[in-house]
């Protein structure tokens, strides 16, 4: 019995101490449980040879709110995070997103028609079956390099474009 109590006290101390030391900034790392990862990154061979849009999921499995503050790739002149929106007149526009919040323990999906990573000024044509690299910089987690699979045009599109694929 006394051994059990001692064990409980030890465990409580282990749990409490890191939290007690958690003032700001560095303290947040103590409660981090998982990893921040980039999943299922794909880009379709675009109909327009100079512009393409990457879809992916950013999974923040950590206990710390993060922010995507930069995207870069050697395959395009300009790489940026965009959000597709419909303005007051009903026109579709794309708004650049400089810093995108990725809350703790949440997933943010990038896909055409919503958030996406836009490649403009592609230096060469994308070929299905190959991959390209995308570097993402996060305010807390640092940088990640995602391998983006190049897939045939129309192969990942859902929603409206799916109708075009029906026979
Ligand atoms: Cu865009």
Image: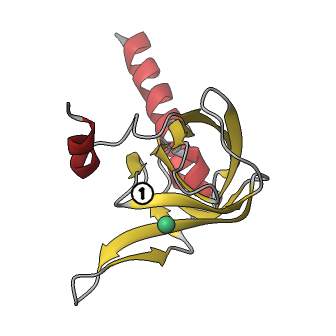
Q: Position of residue 48 (x, y in %)?
A: 55, 57
Colour mapping: secondary structure
Q: Nearer the viewer, residue 119 or 162?
A: 162
The relative height of residue 55 versus residue 6 in the rendered view (above or below) is below
Q: Secondary structure at mark 1?
A: loop
Q: Residue at x 50, y 54 (%)?
A: 64
In this rendering, position of residue 113 left or right of residue 129:
left
Q: Position of residue 76 (x, y in %)?
A: 73, 58
The residue carrying pointer 1 sits among few (fewer than 14), some (14 to 19) or many (20 or more) residues within 10 Å by Cα, namely some
Q: Nearer the viewer, residue 68 or 121?
A: 121
Q: Which residue is mark 1?
A: 103
Q: Nearer the viewer, residue 9 or 41?
A: 41
Q: Position of residue 111 (x, y in %)?
A: 40, 51
Q: Residue furthest front?
A: 167
Q: Is residue 21 visible?
A: no
The relative height of residue 95 versus residue 101 in the rendered view (above or below) is below
Q: Residue at x 22, y 89 (%)?
A: 89
- Mark 1 Cβ and ligand 1 under 8 Å apart: no
The N terminus is located in which quarter? top left
Q: Nearer the viewer, residue 24 or 9?
A: 24
Q: Position of residue 95 (x, y in %)?
A: 45, 77
Q: Is residue 82 visible?
A: yes
Q: Residue furthest bottom?
A: 89
For the image shown, how many numbered marks are present on the structure? 1
The C terminus is located in which quarter? top left
In this rendering, position of residue 59 left or right of residue 71:
left
In this rendering, position of residue 39 left or right of residue 4:
right
């Amino acid at each position: 019995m006394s051994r059990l109590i001692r064990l409980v006290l030890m465990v409580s101390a282990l749990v409490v101490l890191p939290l007690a030391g958690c003032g700001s900034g560095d303290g947040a790392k103590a409660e981090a449980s998982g990893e921040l990862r980039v999943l299922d990154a794909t880009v379709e061979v675009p109909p327009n040879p100079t512009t393409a849009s990457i879809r992916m999921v950013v999974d923040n499995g950590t206990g710390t709110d993060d922010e995507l503050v930069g995207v870069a790739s050697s395959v395009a002149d300009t790489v940026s995070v965009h959000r597709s929106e419909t303005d007051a007149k009903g026109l579709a526009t794309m708004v650049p997103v400089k810093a995108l919040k990725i809350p703790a323990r949440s997933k943010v999906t990038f896909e055409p028609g919503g958030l996406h990573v836009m490649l403009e000024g592609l230096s060469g044509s994308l070929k299905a079956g190959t991959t390209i690299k995308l570097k993402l910089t996060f305010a807390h987690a640092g940088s990640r390099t995602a391998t983006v699979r190049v897939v045939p045009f129309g192969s990942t599109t859902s929603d409206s474009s799916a109708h075009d694929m029906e026979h």
